[in-house]
Image: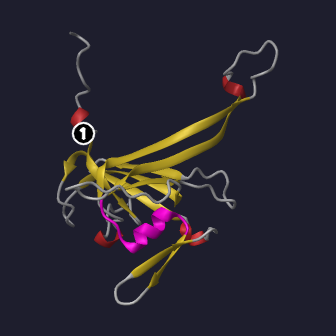
Amino acid sequence: MKYTMVPTDTFKHLVLNAGILAKNFTPATGEIAASDIIGATGDGVTFNANVEYLDFADGIDNMPKNVAELKRIDTIDAKMTGTFKTITSTLAAQLIGAADVTSESGNVKKITPRMNLKDADFQDIWFIGDYSDVNEDGSSSGKAGFIAIHLIKALSTGGFQLKSANKDKGSFPFEYTGHYSNATPNVVPYEVYLAEG
């Protein structure tokens, strides 16, 4: 059993618990405001960054496929998926993708979908999770390791969904997709941060 082992620092490099989704996060300090947490999730969050390649060797006689020097990245499709267990009028509008919130009589909020996108519909989203064996309470003297994924210009592309359940909480599945900008087309729409604490 010589090779049945793990690295000696394994427990310093584990991602723990379900993490949170937030509107803003400051990686330099690890600080997050409670008011920036988007909502409570169920069953965790999944992030995928799928790369599509162009192979310029394909179709050329006497050339094998997948020649490193002729491979190019075409696009990177960055998505964050999961399920919210809570809902607010702001979150409902965000999940619809393009919608406006207006106040009706009393405390009733009306969320009206629209057929056109506005710049404000694209909002950055952060996933932040506990990372490493150093995870103190996060007070000013505490040190906490984290993994953070910054999804840039995120837009809900999964539509608005509600799943109710007998004797259980409602669920709101989500899918956010990061978007490139016409002003900076070479900036990939996500970033990853790791802090060991």
Compared to residue 69, the image places residue 14 above or below, namely: below
The magenta stretch is 85-98
Q: Is residue 32 left or right of residue 121?
A: left
| Residue 21 at x, y percent in the picture | 36, 59
Q: Is residue 129 left or right of residue 138?
A: right
Residue located at (31% from left, 48% from top) = 44
| Residue 30 at x, y percent in the picture | 32, 60
Residue located at (66% from left, 58% from top) = 184
Q: Badge 1, how many Cα within 10 Å: few under 14, some, many 20+?
A: some
Residue closest to the eye, 40 or 106: 106
| Residue 24 at x, y percent in the picture | 41, 66
Residue located at (45% from left, 55% from top) = 150
Compared to residue 123, the image places residue 7 above or below, namely: above
Q: Which of the 4 image quadrants contains residue 54? A: top right
Q: Which residue carries the number 1 mark?
A: 12
State which quarter of the image contains the N terminus: top left
Residue closest to the eye, 110 or 14: 110
Compared to residue 8, the image places residue 197 above or below, namely: below
